[in-house]
Image (cartoon, rainbow, N blue to C red):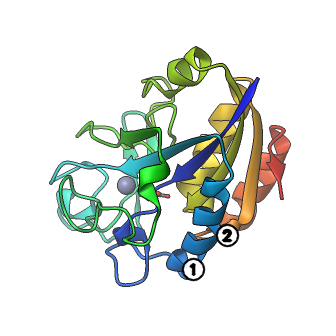
Amino acid sequence: MANALLVIDMQNDFCPGGALAVAEGDRIVPGINALMATSDIVILTQDWHPAGHSSFASSHPGAEPMSLVQMPYGPQVLWPDHCIQGSIGAAFHPDLAQDRADLILRKGYNPAIDSYSAFFENDHSTPTGLEGYLHSRGITGLTLVGLATDFCVNYSAVDAARLGFKVEVRTDLCRGIDLDGSLAASLAGMAEVGVDVR
Ligand code: VGL
Ligand code: ZN
């Protein structure tokens, strides 16, 4: 029985000055570094989109960033171009102690499907392989931190809880986007499926 720290998307594009900046996104880096130093197992996720990704508003003529469209797999928020593979924006925040990571799990590389969750793409069925990795290593508990509380942290935490992991979200080490009340909704939704939101 082991616990792993799962650090979600601590990348330049989600920090102030980035393409999809989350307010105060950079402020949580020191606390995350401190938690990484005392965690046995550290996993980082990295949002990693090809140019022209279907989640980008720029891929949908006439669509505004932050608007909603229907995709074959359900509703999808259209984002500004962000975390393009190999770009500075996709790199981790320069102060993040990324050398502590055992695994860097990339997601969002499928051009046709977004992937908020570290476990499944937004079709809720295409796996990233993280579940198998955790099982192989005997990991049964997860502590989640990072960006953004209401999107990638939320989807990852909910999937993890549904998969049977014991899940804790450290809200002091997360920051949210809060699109139309999405922050409060995500906190309630996580608690509902048994995530320890603290
Ligand atoms: C995220 C929107 C788009 C996140 C990633 O990390 O929460 N949000 N891509
Ligand atoms: Zn993304």
Q: Residues within 10 Å of mark 2 (few under 14, many from 20)?
A: few
SS at mark 1 in the image: helix
Query: At x 60% / y 52%, what residue is drawn?
Result: 153
User: Percent x, y for residue 182?
Assistant: 64, 64
Question: In this orientation, does residue 165 appear?
Answer: yes
- Whether the residue carrying mark 1 lies under 8 Å from ligand 1 is answered with no
Is residue 78 found left or right of 154 in the rendered image?
Answer: left
Q: How many marks?
A: 2
In depth, the one of 173 and 101 nearer the eye is 101
Which is nearer the eye, 160 or 185?
A: 160
Residue 177 visible: no
Q: Amino acid at mark 2?
A: Gly
Quadrant location, the C terminus: bottom right
Q: Left or right: 137 with respect to 181?
A: left
Residue 78 in percent (x, y) is at: 36, 60
Rendering quadrant holding ligand 2: bottom left
Q: Quadrant of the N terminus?
A: top right
Q: Position of residue 107 (x, y in %)?
A: 37, 41
For image coordinates 21% across by 68% down, the residue present is 62
Percent coordinates x, y for residue 193 in the rendering: 80, 38
**Which of the marked residues, 1 or 2, is nearer the chain's N terminus?**
1
Query: Is the residue 31 above or below the residue 39 in the image?
Result: below
- Name the residue at 56% across, 15% down: 136
Crowdedness near tag 1: few (<14), some (14–19) or many (≥20) residues, C-alpha within 10 Å? some
Q: Which residue is mark 2?
A: 181
Question: Of the numbered discs in the image, which one, if any, rests on residue 27?
Answer: 1
Distance of mark 1 from mark 2, alpha carbons?
Answer: 22 Å
Tag 1–tag 2 contact (CB < 8 Å): no
